[in-house]
Image: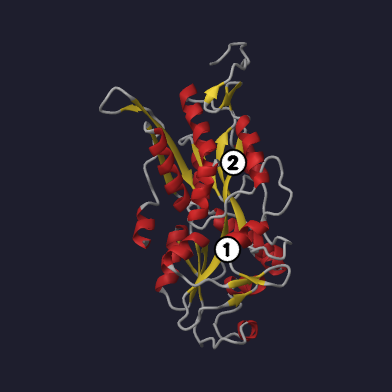
């Protein structure tokens, strides 16, 4: 399974339409970005292609930072990120970008430690491991948190992302909340200057090193840990409970009032049942789709794809492969955002341009 995940990290991205062997036109939609939701996108995009019959959706899982750059360069139809755009990034995009949340997930601390299958961790302990202050598994602070476990006299090997990553952003955002020292020294971001550990590319890269290295620990998307059957630590949430990353605990983290633009963090939720490192992941698109050589049909098909992802069938896929489906509040806000996507001022509804009038008073249909 690991080989499969690694093999699909980079797929071809094409934004052109081409003809099949017959006379029918095949539309191509291209995207790039986060590795965290790739297993979900792999299946939901495949299902959409099967349903449509004449659509190809190519997705390159190159990391959230790469997805944002690709959208900014307009080399793809959509970007994907586990971190919403900050104000500086928004200003750099040369056009208004809409965030469509696609599912919820958790960042888990996966580890390989012989004989230990029920590790407990807190945010401050994780911070000190990655700051290089806790170097051994039998450090007194780890032992105190895990009194029922015999932790070995073994070096800890922290593993982190080498690429710009929304997973890193959410991981560091959580640690900024729970560790003042982390906030001062490391801060939060998609890429950081690490104090300790070894680097790996993508969620699959981190998962692979952890799986192969006795004493290693790394932050990855929960789906990768489940797929590879890696043990993960229970994390102490704000209510003082030790919580696993499950669909229920991740969904509980979203029990907050969400902003209309869906640029929301659900880190360290106050819900007593919440997993503390939970997150939304987003598809990013330009609100006005009339740019470069894009056609009305390109814009229409992209809207159809987004609507399918948040449809009951699309969200059912998320639950089947251990991502939490979106709550009703998020789905409704997504629908409102999708309705704002336009082509030169003409609204796109259900994949078809409405009889709205653009800035030149021309009706686009």
The residue nearer to you, when weighing 176 against 231, is 231
Total marks placed: 2
Where residue 106 appears, x then y in whole percent? 57, 60
Task: Give me the residue at 55% from left, 65% from top.
Answer: 108
Could you say which disc has been placed on residue 199 in the image? Answer: none
The residue beneath circle 2 is: 100
The quadrant of the rendering that contains the N terminus is: bottom left
Mark toward the start of the polypeptide (2 vs 1): 2
Name the quadrant containing residue 266: bottom right
In the picture as drawn, the residue positioned furthest to the left comes out as 21
Q: Secondary structure at mark 2?
A: strand
Task: Give me the residue at 70% from left, 60% from top.
Answer: 269
Q: Secondary structure at mark 1?
A: loop
Where residue 83 appears, x then y in whole percent? 60, 50
Where residue 151 appears, x then y in whole percent? 54, 86
Could you say which disc has been placed on residue 246 in the image? Answer: 1
User: Is 65 placed above or below 200 here?
Assistant: above
Where residue 341 appears, x then y in whole percent? 59, 29
Name the quadrant containing residue 278: bottom right
Color encoding of the figure:
secondary structure
- Density class for disc 1 (Cα within 10 Å; few <14, some 14-19, many ≥20) is some
Task: Give me the residue at 65% from left, 34% from top.
Answer: 336
Residue 193 in sight in this render:
no
- Density class for disc 2 (Cα within 10 Å; few <14, some 14-19, many ≥20) is many
43 left or right of 180 in image: left
The residue nearer to you, when weighing 171 against 299, is 299
276 left or right of 46 in image: right
Q: CA distance from mark 2 to mark 1?
A: 23 Å
User: Is 62 placed above or below 261 here?
Assistant: below
């Amino acid at each position: 399974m690991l080989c499969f995940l690694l093999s699909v990290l980079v797929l071809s991205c094409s934004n052109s339409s081409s003809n099949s062997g017959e006379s029918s036109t095949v539309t191509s939609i291209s995207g790039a970005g986060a590795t965290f939701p790739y297993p979900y996108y792999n299946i939901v995009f495949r299902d959409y292609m099967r349903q449509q019959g004449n659509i190809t959706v190519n997705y390159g899982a190159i990391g959230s930072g790469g997805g944002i750059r690709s959208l900014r360069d307009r080399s793809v139809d959509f970007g994907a990120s586990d971190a919403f755009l900050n104000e500086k990034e928004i200003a750099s995009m040369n056009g208004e970008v809409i965030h469509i949340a696609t599912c919820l997930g958790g960042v888990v601390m996966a580890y390989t430690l012989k004989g230990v299958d029920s590790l407990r961790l807190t945010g401050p302990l994780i911070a000190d491991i990655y700051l290089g202050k806790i170097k051994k598994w039998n450090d007194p602070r780890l032992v105190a948190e895990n009194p029922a476990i015999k932790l070995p006299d073994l070096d800890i090997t922290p593993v982190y992302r080498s690429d710009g990553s929304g997973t890193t952003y959410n991981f560091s955002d959580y640690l900024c909340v729970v560790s003042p020292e982390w906030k001062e020294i490391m801060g939060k971001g998609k890429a950081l200057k690490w104090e300790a550990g070894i680097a790996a590319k993508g969620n699959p890269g981190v998962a692979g090193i952890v799986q192969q290295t006795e004493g290693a620990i790394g932050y990855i998307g929960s789906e990768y840990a489940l797929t590879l059957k890696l043990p993960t630590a229970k994390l102490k949430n704000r209510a003082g409970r030790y919580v696993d990353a499950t669909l229920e605990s991740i969904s509980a983290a979203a029990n907050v009032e969400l902003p209309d633009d869906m640029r929301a963090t659900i880190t360290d939720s106050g819900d007593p049942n919440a997993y503390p490192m939970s997150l939304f992941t987003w598809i990013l698109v330009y609100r006005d789709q009339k740019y470069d050589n894009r056609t009305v049909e390109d814009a229409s098909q992209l809207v159809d794809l987004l609507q399918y992802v948040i449809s009951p069938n699309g969200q059912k896929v998320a639950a089947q492969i251990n991502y939490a489906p979106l709550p009703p509040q998020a789905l409704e806000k997504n629908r409102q955002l999708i309705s704002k996507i336009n082509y030169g001022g003409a609204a796109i509804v259900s994949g078809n341009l409405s009889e709205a009038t653009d800035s030149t008073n021309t009706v686009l249909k």
